[in-house]
Image (tube, rainbow, N blue to C red):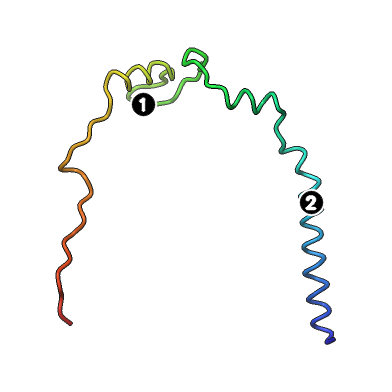
Amino acid sequence: MKYQTKIGLIFCSSALSISLIVLLLIFPFAKLSPEEIKHMNTPQNIENFNLNINMGDDYGFLPVAELMDHYMENPPTTNNSTLLKIPERQFGGC
C-alpha cells in the first residue's frame, strides 16, 4: 500500500473515531427527561403563557393571550386577487 493511502486511511479513521467519541460524550447532556417530554407533548392552556412579545415601537409589549384573542376575533382573510398566479407560458423565438 502506498504511503499516501495509509496516511489518508489513518486520517479518515481517526477523524471518524474522534467525532464518534465527542458525540458519545455530549449526547447525555442533550437528552430530555421523560417528565420534560411528557410536559412538551401535553397541550397547555393559553392562561399558562405569561410571555410578553415585543411588537415594535407602535404597539410595545403585548401578552400572548391578547394576541390570540385578537387573532380569534379577526382571522386573516384571503384575497383572491393576491394569490400567486402562474404566468402564462408563451413560445418565444431565438
What residue is at 77 percent from the left and 69 percent from the top? 12
For label 1, the residue is 57
- Of mark 2 and mark 1, the one earlier in the sequence is 2
For label 2, the residue is 22
Q: Is residue 6 above or below residue 53?
A: below
Pick out the residue farthest to the top: 47
Circle 1: residue type: Asp
* In the displayed structure image, the side of residue 22 where residue 46 appears, left or right: left
Q: CA distance from mark 2 to mark 1?
A: 45 Å
Mark 1 secondary-structure assignment: loop
Quadrant of the rendered image containing residue 3: bottom right
Quarter of the picture holding the C terminus: bottom left
Quadrant of the rendered image containing residue 87: bottom left
Q: Is residue 31 above or below residue 20?
A: above
What residue is at 41 percent from the left and 19 percent from the top? 62
Q: Which sits in the foreground, 37 or 64? A: 37
Give coordinates of residue 70: x percent, y percent.
Answer: 32, 19
